[in-house]
């Protein structure tokens, strides 16, 4: 067996040794050149003389090297080869068609000893190279060619390249700057800018880059690309097909009819969009940042996570996101995202709006997201509009200072919804419009569990009502509020009264069953700056320990809006926040007679009175365990981490290894 393993290793080593690195340079007057020492580790390619002593463009040389017998010089490129392109501007005379398994790297100065890992950058941005390698698709100032196309399931990487001034006619799934395909194909640490696409079709097209077949775009800057197509192509990125990945990217100042930032189209499934920022993208129709239209059943959810959406705009619906599908079973998950100052400007319409997000048809979950200062200038749904979905569950999310411009009684400054809905651990505060929540329940009950509604006002500054209506005929589905706080809410209005259980309010609302609260029940409900208000519970609040235990509910609650475990005390608290005792006020590491220290996977306690208890919290203040002291010396086993340990009146911060 050992001999066989060695044989395989030798074969792999021989295969690796066959791979060649090509060091490409322009060698025109003033252009950078590779140090002569690089000829010892690969082949230096001088594009000024490679064509029988005549110049050749990069794309012409690359295409020639894909031939069995290249006409310029040398041998055919093989999988595993690398092409390193020194800094400079390389004007294209055609598209660079990728070769299976051959990777292209840019951003080099050409200094002796330089390697991929030592390329210098101007900043921490992974695409910001000090020595940029630029592929330009313009001819005499006219944007003409696509930068890159093609790909493979074999590892093929485009890294450190700026693609600019490229163009493609808008056809299905086309790309102006690039179109890459295949699970092995990745574009990373790149810039795509000033690229265009135009035409009358172009469904799924993109002016910047299009991904298909599981291709990946990572740590890249996509900006100032423009689609003038009257079809539904995107401005920055198009995704057409399954399992594509967009991660760590900055997508700014792109424009299109729809999906100015990114477009999800057709049978797209299992796409992941993570750790990206979308800002100042502008769509004349829908989805300033992202638009989807999924026409097939997706086997895996579309995931948008850890992204920021700032100052994107749509002329119609979804200033940031306009997510829809023709298949109700399709699932979209939006998690840990922030939406700030996005706008939609459609005319008043009960099917269009959503300053930040518009959801339609499919099944949606929104978790740990924050919506702040978004607006629909004329229509409904300042932050979120849901005209029709299979279901929508929103958890641990904040809706703060959003605005709906309509002056009618149906604005929904935070949410306008005409479908079934579940909200858990959510905060709706300081939104402005005739109603903060406007609901039409249809086929099933809409539920709100452990939510806080506070200081939502009309444009005149009066407390705004929560609007609850019904669609269809009697008997209507109900609205169910459990463990909810209502502060400065004028009433429930509409055709139906909700069912409320263990809720609290600062004024008389129908069926509210807990004592009246005041602003003193919150840490800071009156701060002049809305965004700085703190609606977590103050010490002594009447909402503490007064809620219903929802840990075994149909939609179970086990944590609060911040991720703290519920309950912390003798029962569930009411509202989005579980009260956490301020144990840090007595934090002390001074040694008295009490000795508390950590050893391997445990906390050791010495010289402690047996009438005390030991309470252990995690570093966020969440209660983990409480142990009655049975002897002067004891130990508590814990996983590796940092803990706050309270013994009597003293609190120690302990690190367990």
Image (tube, grey):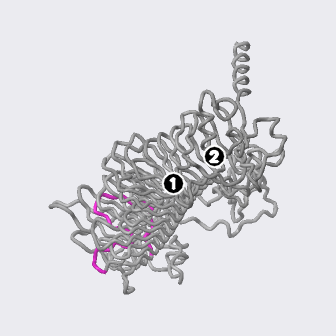
Magenta highlight on residue 418: yes
Q: Which residue is mark 1?
A: 144
Q: Which residue is mark 2?
A: 57
Task: Out of 96 and 108, give the one closest to the viewer.
Answer: 96
Residue 196, position in %: x, y? Answer: 49, 58
Q: Where 68 falls versus 396 (above or below)?
A: above
Which is more toward the observer, 510 or 404? 404
Residue 590: give x, y in percent of width and height: 81, 64
Q: Which mark is residue 657?
A: none
Q: How many marks?
A: 2
- Helix, strand or loop under label 1: loop
Secondary structure type for disc 2 = loop
Query: Image quarter for residue 277?
Result: bottom right
Q: Nearer the viewer, residue 512 or 203?
A: 203
- Image location (x, y in percent) of residue 470: 22, 65
- Judging depth in this view, the residue of 120 and 409 nearest the camera is 120
Q: Residue at x 25, y 69 (%)?
A: 497
**Residue at image location 44% in from the left, 58% down from the top:** 290
- Check the image and name the residue furthest to the front: 53
Q: x, y percentage for residue 542?
A: 46, 72
Seen in the picture, residue 428 relative to 475 is either above or below; the reply is: below
The answer, for residue 333, to whether it is visible in the render is yes
* CA distance for labels 2 and 1: 15 Å
What is the residue that sits farthest to the bottom in this orientation? 460
Around disc 2, counting alpha carbons within 10 Å, would you say few (fewer than 14), some (14 to 19), or many (20 or more)?
Answer: some
Q: Image quarter for residue 469?
A: bottom left
In the picture, measured across the screen, residue 273 lies left or right of residue 547, that is: right
| Residue located 52% across and 43% down the image | 149
Q: Which residues are magenta?
A: 407-429
Is 476 contained in the magenta span?
Answer: no
Q: Earlier in the sequence, mark 2 or mark 1?
A: 2
- Specify the farthest residue to the left: 473
């Amino acid at each position: 067996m050992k001999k066989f393993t060695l044989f395989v290793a030798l074969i792999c080593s021989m295969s690796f040794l066959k791979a060649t690195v090509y060091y490409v340079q322009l060698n025109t007057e003033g252009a950078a050149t590779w140090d002569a020492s690089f000829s010892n580790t690969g082949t230096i390619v001088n594009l000024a003389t490679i064509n029988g002593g005549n110049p050749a463009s990069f794309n012409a040389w690359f295409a020639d090297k894909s031939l069995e017998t290249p006409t310029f010089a040398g041998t055919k490129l093989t999988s595993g080869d690398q092409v390193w392109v020194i800094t400079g501007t390389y004007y294209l005379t055609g598209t660079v068609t990728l070769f299976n398994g051959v990777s292209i790297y840019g951003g080099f100065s050409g200094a002796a000893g330089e390697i991929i890992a030592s390329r210098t950058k101007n900043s921490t941005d992974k695409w910001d190279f000090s020595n940029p390698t630029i592929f330009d698709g313009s001819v005499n100032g006219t944007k003409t060619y696509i930068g890159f196309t093609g790909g493979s399931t074999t590892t093929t990487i485009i890294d450190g390249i700026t693609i600019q001034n490229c163009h493609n006619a808008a056809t299905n799934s086309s790309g102006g700057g690039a179109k890459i395909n295949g699970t092995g194909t990745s574009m990373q640490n790149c810039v795509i800018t000033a690229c265009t696409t135009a035409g009358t079709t172009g469904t799924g097209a993109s002016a910047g880059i299009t991904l298909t077949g599981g291709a990946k775009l990572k740590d890249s800057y996509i900006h100032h690309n423009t689609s003038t197509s009257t079809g539904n192509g995107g401005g920055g990125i198009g995704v057409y097909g399954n399992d594509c990945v967009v991660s760590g990217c900055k997508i700014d100042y792109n424009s299109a009819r729809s999906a100015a930032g990114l477009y999800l189209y057709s049978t797209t499934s299992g796409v992941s969009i993570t750790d990206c920022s979308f800002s100042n993208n502008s769509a004349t129709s829908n989805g300033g940042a992202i638009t989807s239209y999924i026409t097939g059943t997706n086997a895996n959810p579309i995931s948008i996570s850890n992204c920021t959406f700032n100052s994107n705009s749509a002329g119609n619906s979804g200033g940031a996101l306009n997510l829809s599908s023709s298949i109700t079973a399709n699932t979209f998950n939006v998690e840990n995202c922030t939406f700030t100052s996005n706008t939609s400007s459609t005319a008043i319409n009960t099917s269009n709006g959503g300053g930040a997000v518009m959801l339609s048809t499919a099944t949606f979950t929104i978790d740990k997201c924050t919506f702040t200062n978004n607006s629909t200038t004329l229509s409904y749904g300042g932050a979120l509009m849901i005209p029709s979905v299979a279901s929508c569950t929103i958890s641990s999310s904040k809706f703060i200072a959003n605005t709906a411009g309509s002056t009618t009684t149906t604005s929904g400054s935070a949410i306008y919804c005409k479908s079934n809905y579940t909200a858990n651990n959510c905060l709706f505060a300081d939104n402005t419009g005739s109603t903060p929540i406007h609901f039409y329940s249809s086929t099933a009950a809409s539920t709100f569990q452990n939510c806080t509604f506070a200081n939502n006002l009309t444009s005149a500054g009066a407390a705004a009502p929560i609007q609850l209506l019904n669609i269809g005929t009697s008997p209507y589905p109900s609205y169910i509020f459990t463990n909810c706080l209502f502060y400065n809410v004028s009433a429930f209005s509409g055709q139906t009264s909700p069912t409320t259980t263990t809720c609290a309010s600062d004024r008389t609302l129908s069926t509210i069953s807990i004592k009246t609260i005041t602003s003193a029940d919150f840490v800071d409900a009156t701060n002049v700056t809305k965004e700085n208000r703190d609606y977590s519970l103050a010490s002594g609040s009447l909402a503490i320990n007064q809620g219903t235990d929802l840990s075994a509910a149909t939609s179970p609650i086990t944590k609060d809006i911040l991720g703290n475990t519920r309950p912390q005390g003798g029962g569930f608290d009411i509202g989005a926040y579980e009260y956490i005792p301020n144990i840090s006020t007595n934090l002390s590491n001074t040694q008295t007679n009490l000795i508390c220290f950590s050893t391997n996977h445990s906390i050791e306690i010495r010289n402690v009175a047996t009438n005390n208890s030991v309470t252990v919290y995690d570093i966020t203040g969440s209660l983990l365990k409480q142990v009655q002291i049975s002897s002067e010396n004891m130990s508590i086993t814990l996983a590796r981490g940092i803990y706050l340990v309270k013994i009597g009146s003293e609190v120690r911060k302990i690190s367990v290894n």
